[in-house]
Amino acid sequence: MKPVWLAFFILAGGAAWAQTATIKQLMLDLIHPASNDIQLFVNRGAPKNDAEWAMVRRSALTLAESGDLLTARGQNFQGDWAKDAKALGDVGTAAYKAAQAKDFATLAGLTDSLDASCTNCHKQFRPNVFPRDGGSK
């Protein structure tokens, strides 16, 4: 995945722009794959070469910037939407710094925070995924 278009969003800053992707599309096509990439590298062992570290960096940067994208699209949401989006961005930023330093121990230590940032939001905004009564659907 080459999130070159993401640089446009970063450079555009607060400029008005048409939203191309829905929240669902951001989740399915950017956030979920980026999160999975990081989790897989941690579960399978450290990236073994520069190309694998580059993949981790891209995934982490995608997560870091996705917090802002979600906040921009979630203006009508109640509850902890902004806090949860910030948590995703923060853990993405920390993962990006760890990947830049090729610090696998730090990257591995972030996986619980990454998982929690997703789970906390989904419990509130995707109750069909995490039912409030603790059962599964």
Image (spheres, helix red, strand yellow):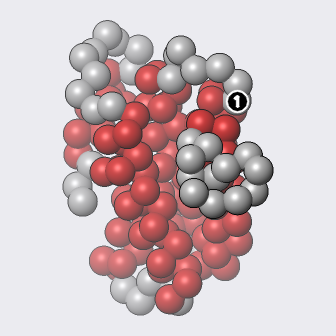
Pinpoint residue 104: horizontal percent, then vertical percent. 59, 79
- Look at the picture and state if 71 lies above or below 137: above
Left or right, 104 with reference to 2: right
Please indicate, yes or no, whether residue 13 appears anywhere in the rendered image.
yes
Q: Quadrant of residue 124?
A: top right
Q: In what quadrant of the picture does the C terminus appear? A: bottom right
Residue under label 1:
80
The residue depicted at 42 percent of the width and 69 percent of the height is 37
The residue depicted at 40 percent of the width and 34 percent of the height is 23
Q: Quadrant of residue 115?
A: bottom right
Pinpoint residue 103: horizontal percent, then vertical percent. 59, 75
Q: Nearer the viewer, residue 80 or 106?
A: 80
The residue depicted at 73 percent of the width and 46 percent of the height is 132
Label 1 crowd (10 A; few <14 / some 14-19 / many >=20): few
Q: Nearer the viewer, residue 11 or 41?
A: 41
- Look at the picture and state if 85 lies above or below 58: above
The residue depicted at 47 percent of the width and 78 percent of the height is 40
Q: Quadrant of residue 89?
A: top right
- Look at the picture and state if 65 lies above or below 14: below
Q: Amino acid at mark 1?
A: Asp
